[in-house]
Amino acid sequence: MTAVSIRNVWKSYGDQVVLENISLEVAPHAFVSLVGPSGCGKSTFLRMLLSQETPTRGAILVDGAPLAPEPTPDRGVVFQKYSVYPHLTALENVALGLELARSPLLGRLFGARRRAVMEEAAESLEAVGLATARDKYPAQLSGGMQQRLAIAQALIKKPRILLLDEPFGALDPGIRKDIHDLMLDLWWRTRMTVFMVSHDLREAFYLGTRIIAFDRTRTRPEERDAYGATITFDMPLDPSDPVKARIRAAEEAAARGLDLPLSDGGAGRCH
Ligand SMILES: Nc1ncnc2c1ncn2[C@@H]1O[C@H](COP(=O)(O)OP(=O)(O)OP(=O)(O)O)[C@@H](O)[C@H]1O
Ligand SMILES: [Mg+2]
């Protein structure tokens, strides 16, 4: 299980400070829900955890060691937009990541090694409930199924840290419920440490063991570029709470006017 330490991290683009002094100790196997208005640097934060961006200042440690400077298979990611290849079947989509990892030059394996990869890909599809869709192309899958496929793609490399950037934002509520339960099940079984950005407070409370909000505290126009967003809310959530209690907690927090910034809450300060 994997602990993540974020120590005094700042991120600027040119003169614009996006994130300011973010410090966070994340326990092994935590499920961190990250909320905040649009433009507050949530995706930027995930990209730093992936090593697609580097902090301008500060450090990120995984189990006490500095993050690798390049993306590595121990960190998986699922985005809101489908990241699957349209010309490959579900099985081929999932297998591709492993083929590229094991045969970086050709991107293809042959014989027993290819069969082994295909078997692993089939298992990964089964784990997300897509066993019967293995030979279908993405266009033949529903939105929910495509997101399950994206999860299978991320999980086949057995990441220790999973980064989710609004992965369920485009799905209908009924489909979301099933995929939430799948996500919790996978998180328990794999013992991954998860960071999930969400604009849906109920989803954030339902899935998370901890909820973090990013927001700007200085908002005058002349301060816009000079100061970034920082952590304005940090609350542990008891994973053994019954679902209803956790959703109720979300609603009570909102009713008490807690500064839990939501994209549609009017409090949105970042942009
Ligand atoms: N590569 C980049 N170059 C310059 N500015 C960037 C870059 N990436 C992000 N930004 C800026 O950083 C800020 C934060 O962007 P980011 O996408 O991280 O926000 P976010 O919280 O994920 O927003 P949303 O909720 O809309 O997805 C924005 O002002 C954005 O324009
Ligand atoms: Mg974003």
Image (cartoon, rainbow, N blue to C red):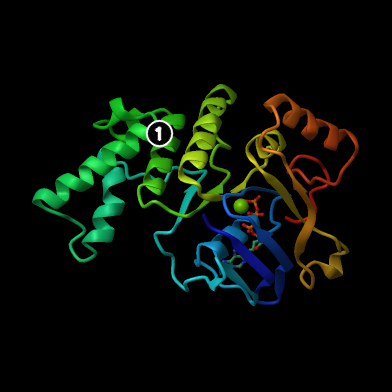
Name the outermost residue toward the top. Answer: 174
| Ligand 1 image position (quadrant) | bottom right
- Residue 53, given in percent of the width and then of the height, sits at 54, 69
Q: Residue at x 31, y 41 (%)?
A: 86
Relative to the observer, which residue lies in front, 107 or 3? 3
Relative to the observer, which residue lies in front, 201 or 270? 201
Q: Residues within 10 Å of mark 1 (few under 14, many from 20)?
A: many
Left or right: 81, with 86 as reference point? right
Q: Residue at x 69, y 56 (%)?
A: 39
Q: Residue at x 60, y 56 (%)?
A: 43
Q: Quadrant of the C terminus?
A: bottom right
- Residue 147, given in percent of the width and then of the height, sits at 45, 37
Q: Is residue 100 above or below residue 139?
A: below
Count of numbered tags: 1
Q: Residue at x 77, y 59 (%)?
A: 231
- Residue 250, given in percent of the width and then of the height, sits at 78, 34
Residue type at numbered disc 1: Val
| Residue bearing the label numbered 1 | 128
Give the quarter of the image for residue 57. Answer: bottom right
Left or right: 44, with 132 as reference point? right
Q: Is residue 216 above or below residue 91?
A: below
Q: Is residue 137 above or below residue 68?
A: above
- Residue 230, given in percent of the width and then of the height, sits at 76, 62
Q: Quick one: SS at disc 1?
A: loop
Name the outermost residue toward the right. Answer: 256
Viewer can see residue 89: no
Left or right: 254, with 25 as reference point? right
Viewer can see residue 114: yes
Residue behind label 1 places its C-beta within 8 angstroms of ligand 2: no
